[in-house]
Amino acid sequence: MRKYLIILSGLLFVFTGSAFAEDCKTKKVRYGVSVTGARYRKNVRHLLLVGNLRGDKKLIYEKYGFTFHRLRSNAAGKKTERWKYYDEGLEFVFDDDSNLIEERRILVEHRRDW
């Protein structure tokens, strides 16, 4: 008798659990935005850079555009960032607060047109 009572309670537990279960086909699952792949991460960094520029950096960016030749350095507690535009032959040096410290001419790089 006890065996039948245990089996009956187990079956009752299984069937009532499936009766209250949610239908997975009708419910939409939303995942958070994830950044995958090196190219996608590069594009996100570029968009974040453009949106957060201010001061002299923003003026230079609007005039000359984006450059891949950016170097950020921290030397003796002084943070600087160098932007080089080889096509125009210019180099700009900014401080940590986006103020232009130095502008100088460099050699123009002539590229081949393939």
Image (tube, rainbow, N blue to C red):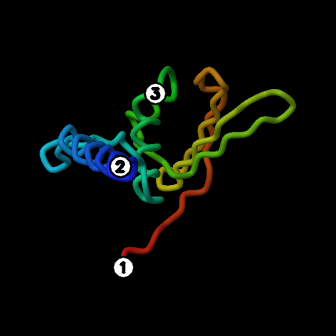
* Left/right of residue 85 with respect to residue 22 in the rendered view: right
For label 2, the SS is loop
Q: CA distance from mark 2 to mark 3?
A: 75 Å
Res. 29 image quadrant: top left
Q: CA distance from mark 1 to mark 3?
A: 35 Å
For mark 1, what is the residue?
114
**Mark earlier in primary sequence (1, 3):** 3
For label 3, the SS is helix
- Give amino acid for label 1: Trp
* Left/right of residue 8 with respect to residue 78 in the rendered view: left
Is disc 1 surrounded by few (<14), some (14 to 19) or many (20+) residues within 10 Å? few
For mark 2, what is the residue?
1
Q: Position of residue 93 (x, y in %)?
A: 64, 35
At 26% from the left and 42% from the top, the residue drawn is 17
Viewer-side residue, 43 vs 106? 43
**Residue 49: mark in rendering:** none
